[in-house]
Image (tube, rainbow, N blue to C red):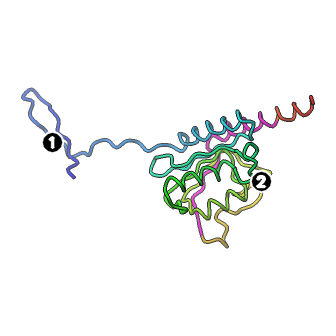
């Protein structure tokens, strides 16, 4: 493929060949994908669920989306990450998601961390730490555990403030409703 660019320059409109390749579109940022995960967390909130969202991205395309549905579906495994992984597996017709990244608004729990390992996700990006159930570093260290056979890159703290605020507001409102009866 010829990466040269032809352009009209000069008074004689001569074709001048530049050997510089055309500008490459800047890669999507982690924050962009986390914004989508936050939108999904908002959907969970609107459904009366704990506001957690997740997206699975492969080659700059979203292949799976999820938000917490465990209450509405009566399914203890319907966490945002699991729902997103299931959709990604169905979209790609493969249970292995080796070329995929998962973006979650909160540090995954033990169940979700295990699913990420079994799916062979290459990269995990999450917002807020979960000091009560986090299984990346807060409570347990399942991701990249030395006894397990899969390693993934991890980035934490992406839009963590917004993720934390959404969760804190949800639980504050829930406590207030319980207090008021």
Quadrant of the rendered structure where residue 24 is? top left
Q: Which mark is residue 17?
A: 1
Mark 1 surroundings within 10 Å by alpha-carbon count, few (fewer than 14), some (14 through 19), many (20 or more): few
In the image, is 6 to the left or to the right of 94?
A: left
Looking at the picture, does residue 109 appear above or below residue 175? below
What residue did someone put label 2 on? 133
Magenta span: 150-171
Mark 2 surroundings within 10 Å by alpha-carbon count, few (fewer than 14), some (14 through 19), many (20 or more): some
Cα–Cα span, label 2 and label 1: 59 Å
In the image, is 47 to the left or to the right of 121?
A: right
Q: Pick the residue in front: 16 or 57.
A: 57
Looking at the picture, does residue 16 appear above or below residue 134? above
Q: Which mark is residue 47?
A: none
Q: Pick the residue in front: 33 or 76.
A: 76
**Does dot 1 land on a helix, a strand or a loop?**
strand
Residue at horizontal 17%, vertical 35%? Answer: 7
Toward the front, the furthest residue is 73
Asked if the magenta segment contains residue 169, the reply would be yes
Q: Earlier in the sequence, mark 2 or mark 1?
A: 1
């Amino acid at each position: 493929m010829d990466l040269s660019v032809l352009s009209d320059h000069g008074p004689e409109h001569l074709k001048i060949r530049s050997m510089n390749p055309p500008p490459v579109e800047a890669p999507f940022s982690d924050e962009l994908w986390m914004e989508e995960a936050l939108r999904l967390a908002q959907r969970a909130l609107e459904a009366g669920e704990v506001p957690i969202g997740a997206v699975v991205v492969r080659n700059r395309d979203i292949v799976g989306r999820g938000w917490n549905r465990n209450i509405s579906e009566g399914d203890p495994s319907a966490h945002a990450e699991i729902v997103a992984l299931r959709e990604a597996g169905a979209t790609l017709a493969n249970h292995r998601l080796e070329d995929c990244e998962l973006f979650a608004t909160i540090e995954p729990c033990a169940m979700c961390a295990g699913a990420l390992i079994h799916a062979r996700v290459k990269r995990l990006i999450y917002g807020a730490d979960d000091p009560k159930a986090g299984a990346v570093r807060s409570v347990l260290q399942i991701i990249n555990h030395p006894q397990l056979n899969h390693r993934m890159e991890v980035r934490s703290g992406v839009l963590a403030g917004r993720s934390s605020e959404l969760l804190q507001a949800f639980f504050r409102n829930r406590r207030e409703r319980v207090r008021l009866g």
